[in-house]
Image (cartoon, coloured by chain):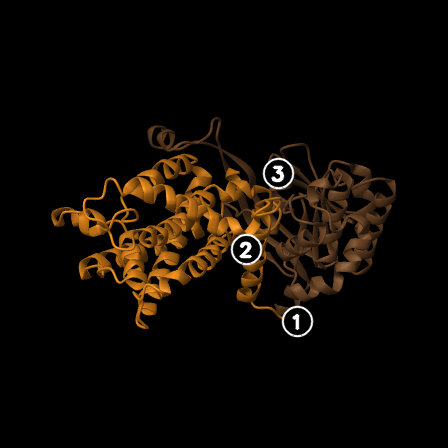
Amino acid sequence: MSTTKNNIAIELTGISKRYEIHHEKPTLVEKFVKGRNESFWALKNINLTIKKGERVGIMGPNGSGKTTLLKIITGITNPTSGNVNTYGKVVSLIDLEAGFHPDLTGVQNIYLNAMFLGMAKKEIDRKLKAIIAFAGIRQFIDTPFFTYSQGMKLRLGFSVATHSNPDILLLDENFSVGDEKFGKKSRDVIKQFRKQKKTILIASHWKDFIKQNCKRIITLEEGRIINDTHC
Amino acid sequence: MTRTKTQQFLELLWGMTERELRARYKYTIFGFLWIVLNPLLQMLIIGFVFRFFMKEPVQNYYYFLFIGLLVWNFFSLSLSKATPSIIYERTLIKKAKFPCQIIPLAIIISNFIHLLVAITLLGLPILFLRTMVPGSIFYILTAFVLLFAFTAGICLLSSALNVRFRDVNLFVQAFIMFWFYATPIIYPLSIVPYQYYWLWRFNPMTSILQLLQHGFLNMPLPGVAMVSINSTIIAVTLIVGIITFRNESKNFDDWI
């Protein structure tokens, strides 16, 4: 039993997620007058086991539950029912710019952001130079974050996230970071992660990208897994 | 390299607190000096006006006022900033899994550091009033512990509830105004007729202020009933705040 457990990176059993639909801003009065809100099931009874080192693509139309699934695996939100077990450090690249403070400098932001991704201060000290170099923002590292261009912000976010040494990496769609040059750099990182046998999940409807990078494709539709193929 | 959950929590908490401290006085000319300037101005204005209303003048009224205002500023600023804090930090919550408690707690701690600095600076002249004895420190520390516990409890509660019910923030803003006058800050509790004391027993800030006024200025201590009822409310608030936050935080992401 324990040996099989060691091979597993992500284990989902009976995961369902219900969202309450709020048409208007919810208020206390509304809550008490109308009682329960309408609800909507984003995921319905998902059972999924992903082994260590697997590269899984999650496909499906908009609103099929891809992002919700990633959020539940990361632990950003909790399922309404079911169990999530993850083995190893999970980092998701759902929102790269998140967690940066506009008034703080690049360095200060790197420390803060990296801490949120579970890095220890000493670890950040060691990797600081590499993070800055990878993002290519050495010149601006002491200027406040609000002066950064959109591309610089994304690059810094990506750099911090990939340097946090995740065991399981979750990528959401719109994963096109920065310009051509940086796009190549980031694809190289994904390749390197592949070599290091890290578990990678990619949610996207960009079929070619998934086929290129993934060995297993899961298709979601209306919150259910309708297809799970190894290729 | 194994780090316990607690270590990680503390590191993150301190990181956020530093951020609060750094970001607050960025691009200001007076910077840190605002800690002292702000209450000083308030003290002068309120002190001047209220002298006309006080039937019996309070000894060392300006000092009395300054202690009350500093403590109140800490409390009201923490509460009004912490209540909507989860919503303001929505991008963080959508980014990674981390103990969200650090968001309101970092605000409280950064304000608390401000309070301690300001009290030390402006409190130095109090030493020359000869109202303090070595034992005073006991009352002052007790008051600070109660103050921190109460602020933390109520901020955890309000920030967690505000995610689903945005009314909480508006209610808090309105209530803080009223609460200021319901707390012995600009007046000593002794001007309140005894038959109304029970009203103040529901306001935990009463004991906290009375303990500080006793500690610094040797004013009368709060009564036993006052301290015990106030402390009970503080303990209950803290527990309810922690539990509510824990339950609500599971689904913050769904609401922001």
Q: Nearer the viewer, residue B15 or B179?
A: B179
Q: Give the CA separation, mark 1 to mark 2.
A: 25 Å
Q: Dot 1: what SS?
A: loop
Q: Crowding near pointer 1: few (<14 within 10 Å), some, many (20+)? A: few
Q: Crowding near pointer 2: few (<14 within 10 Å), some, many (20+)? A: many
Residue type for callout 1: Met
Judged by depth in the image, the label closer to the viewer, 1 or 3, is 1
Judged by depth in the image, the label closer to the viewer, 1 or 2, is 2
Q: Crowding near pointer 3: few (<14 within 10 Å), some, many (20+)? A: many
Left or right, residue B90 beside residue B244: right
Chain of the residue displaying label 2: B
Q: Dot 3: what SS?
A: loop
Please identify the quarter of the rendering in which residue B17 is found.
Answer: bottom right
Residue drawn at the location 57% of the way across and 49% of the way down: B31
Q: Quick check: marks 3 and 2 in contact, CB under 8 Å?
A: no
* Residue where numbered disc 3 is placed: A65
State whether residue B244 appears in this view: no
Q: Estimate the x, y position of residue A83 in percent, counting from the top left.
A: 53, 53
Left or right, residue B167 beside residue B191: right
Colour chosen for chain B: orange
* Residue where numbered disc 2 is placed: B17
* Residue where numbered disc 1 is placed: B1
Q: Which chain is brown?
A: A
Q: Dot 2: what SS?
A: helix
Left or right, residue A50 beside residue B63: right
Residue type for callout 3: Gly
Q: Give the CA separation, mark 3 to mark 2.
A: 36 Å
Left or right, residue B225 beside residue B30: left
Chain of the residue displaying label 1: B
